[in-house]
Amino acid sequence: MRLAPGRYKYKFIVDGQWMHSPDFPTVPDGKGGLNNEIAVKGASAELESLPVATPPKVELSKVEAAPTCNPKLNATVTAKTTGTKAIAKKPVQKSLASLMSEDIIPALQKELEKQEGISDLSLKFADNQLQGDFEKNGIRYSFWAYFPDGTLEGSRGFSLSSHGCPPSTIEPFLIDEKKITANLVVFWVMKRLFAQKLLSQN
């Protein structure tokens, strides 16, 4: 077959895939890829005179795994080609004692010290009990927040006393909260003291 003078674009078929050769001149194919190009000048040329090129080499390391319809197989291919991702470590959860000493007691003390007329304030945590004592208008008051299971998520109770009397009946504490935090403990202790009129709203 003879070719008339002009420019002709071509590609090679390698394993069923259209590919250009880097050994010969190339031009854009208009689809983001490249075509090889040959220029025929003067008299017509035989088709057989087109250059014979060695098929382009394909680096296996650059070939991406083709997706499959099998999710498990896709997961396996992804793991092999991208590597195992680092698993984020969960933050270490504080013990109840650390939570009390580092977060709850300092915040509660700060709130109580804002109240007028309170003196001789004492807060401590022992035997899974948060105990507070203070004096107001010459009367000694005490309160307890109980955490018998040693966690904020377990059973909880609250009681009060005054004039050095034994604690009142233990009542449920924080029963309507789904996730207990240090701030919630402080908030509800203060709310209980306000409810018993031991503290006054500013």
Image (cartoon, rainbow, N blue to C red):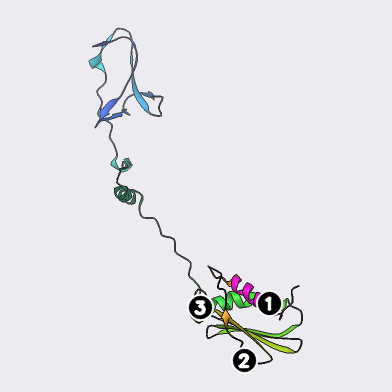
- What segment is highlighted magenta in the picture? 184-202
Q: Residue at x 50, y 82 (%)?
A: 148
**Picture coordinates of residue 97, whole percent (x, y):** 53, 79
As helix, strand or loop, the secondary structure at mark 3 comes to: loop
Residue that label 3 marks: 155
**Picture coordinates of residue 145, whole percent (x, y):** 58, 81
In space, the residues marked 1 and 3 are separated at their CA atoms by 22 Å
Residue that label 2 marks: 166
Q: Residue at x 34, y 49 (%)?
A: 78
User: Residue 23 or 58: which is nearer the viewer?
Assistant: 58
Q: Earlier in the sequence, mark 3 or mark 2?
A: 3
In space, the residues marked 1 and 2 are separated at their CA atoms by 19 Å
Callout 2 crowding tier (Cα within 10 Å): few <14, some 14–19, many ≥20: few
Q: Earlier in the sequence, mark 1 or mark 3?
A: 3
Residue that label 1 marks: 195
Q: Is residue 86 above or below residue 11?
A: below
Q: Is residue 165 left or right of residue 139?
A: left
